[in-house]
Amino acid sequence: GDSVTQTEGQVALSEEDFLTIHCNYSASGYPTLFWYVQYPGEGPQLLFRASRDKEKGSSRGFEATYDKGTTSFHLRKASVQESDSAVYYCALSDRGSNNRIFFGDGTQLVVKP
Amino acid sequence: EAAVTQSPRNKVAVTGGKVTLSCNQTNNHNNMYWYRQDTGHGLRLIHYSYGAGSTEKGDIPDGYKASRPSQENFSLILELATPSQTSVYFCASGDAGPDYAEQFFGPGTRLTVL
């Protein structure tokens, strides 16, 4: 079945550090990939998506490139800010998923000033 | 802008009691979802619905029922609440395009079962 694996459960950085959160997926079809962000006290919200191999999704300085060869969609940001502290979810959806989205376990990002 | 609201936002219940969590969406989306969120487990799907009158089991449906009386409303029902159901519950609504589904989340309900 479809699944998403996020390697890091928690990432602690200082402001202006470079961020990478790793995401790998397994899917029977050709999925669309997402990154969602969840700020404290709120529900998850879509950060961006990508639907084709080599497509780059981006928003608010975050970016990820769809890599079908390595089944990956790693999240990166060149210089994090304290306001980026949140939980980040990698997710996928495909035509065979009955309108479901499959989420990874999430990565808690803590950015210290 | 998508709008999904949940009530109550916080709930304390006793073991064995009945709990109903409500969700309302004004997006006219066909699909609605209930998730629970626990540390180390991320978002786990409990029940979902394709439209009024339909409910489907998700990955962890045991101990939960769902009801979709209208396009706008989707309820999660715990007939006999247990402490293991203490969690944060999120409702979402969305639709499926030709290639993927999108979901918009509510603010969550924090449930404590004593």
Image (spheres, grey):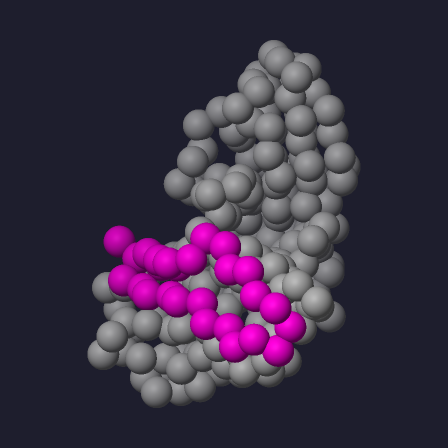
Question: Is residue A49 in view from this perspective?
Answer: no
Q: Residue at x 58, y 72 (%)?
A: A47
Q: Residue A104's quadrant in the figure?
A: bottom left
Q: Which percent across, then down, holds residue A41?
A: 72, 50
Quadrant location, the C terminus of chain A: bottom right
Report the side of A57 relative to A83 (left or right). Answer: left
Q: Residue at x 44, y 27 (%)?
A: B62
Give the residues drawn in magenta, as a range.
Answer: A1-26
Magenta stretch contains residue B62: no
Report the side of A35 relative to A27 (left or right). Answer: right
Q: Which percent across, then down, holds residue B36?
A: 55, 41
Q: How many marks?
A: 0
Residue B9's place in the image compared with B99, above or below, is: above
Q: Which percent across, then down, holds residue A71?
A: 28, 72
Magenta stretch contains residue A7: yes
Q: Residue at x 67, y 31 (%)?
A: B111
Residue A99's place in the image compared with B57, above or below, is: below
Along the line of sight, which residue is nearer the eye, B40 or B24?
Answer: B40
Q: Main secondary structure of the magenta part?
A: strand
Q: Which percent across, then down, holds residue A99?
A: 44, 59
Question: Is residue A26 in view from this perspective?
Answer: yes
Along the line of sight, which residue is nearer the eye, B77 or A13?
Answer: A13
Residue A71's place in the image compared with B66, above or below, is: below
Report the side of B10 relative to A65 (left or right). Answer: right
